Image (cartoon, rainbow, N blue to C red):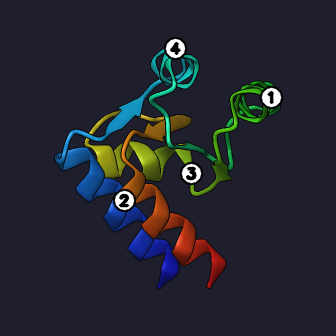
Amino acid sequence: MARDRILNLIGLAMKAGKVVSGEFSVEKCIKSGKARLVIIATDASENTKKKFEDKCKFYHVPILIYSTKEDLGMILGKGLRSSITLTEDGFKNAILKITEE
């Protein structure tokens, strides 16, 4: 149930234009200070996970290892996505609240 709620929120954020996807774009968003929450697919490579964990720690951005590349891509209406970021605090707070339940 919580999984569906999180994926639905990601879909809503995408429709609102508050999602950035793809490794290069997500990294750029983190460095520019626009990233509010980074979501990495559970089946992303260990190198990708480590890279984003380090970047998020350095720039003080929360990170969530969640779902699969296929699910993230499907909810965004794109191909496989190993990393996405939300750029709006409302969506970030809603997702983090669900993960704490």
Q: Amino acid at mark 3?
A: Thr
| Residue at (54% x, 21% y) in the render | 23
Mark 3 packing: few (<14 Cα in 10 Å), some, or many (20+)?
A: some
Q: Disc 1 versus disc 3: distance between alpha carbons?
A: 20 Å
Q: Quick check: marks 3 and 2 in contact, CB under 8 Å?
A: no
User: Sequence order check: which comes first, mark 1 or mark 2?
Assistant: 1
Q: Disc 2 versus disc 4: distance between alpha carbons?
A: 24 Å
Identify the residue position indicated by label 1 in the image.
54
Q: Secondary structure at mark 1?
A: helix
Q: Disc 1 versus disc 2: distance between alpha carbons?
A: 24 Å
Q: Amino acid at mark 2?
A: Gly
Identify the residue position indicated by label 4 in the image.
24
Identify the residue position indicated by label 3 in the image.
68
Q: Disc 3 versus disc 2: distance between alpha carbons?
A: 23 Å
User: Sequence order check: which comes first, mark 1 or mark 4?
Assistant: 4
Labelled disc at residue 90: 2
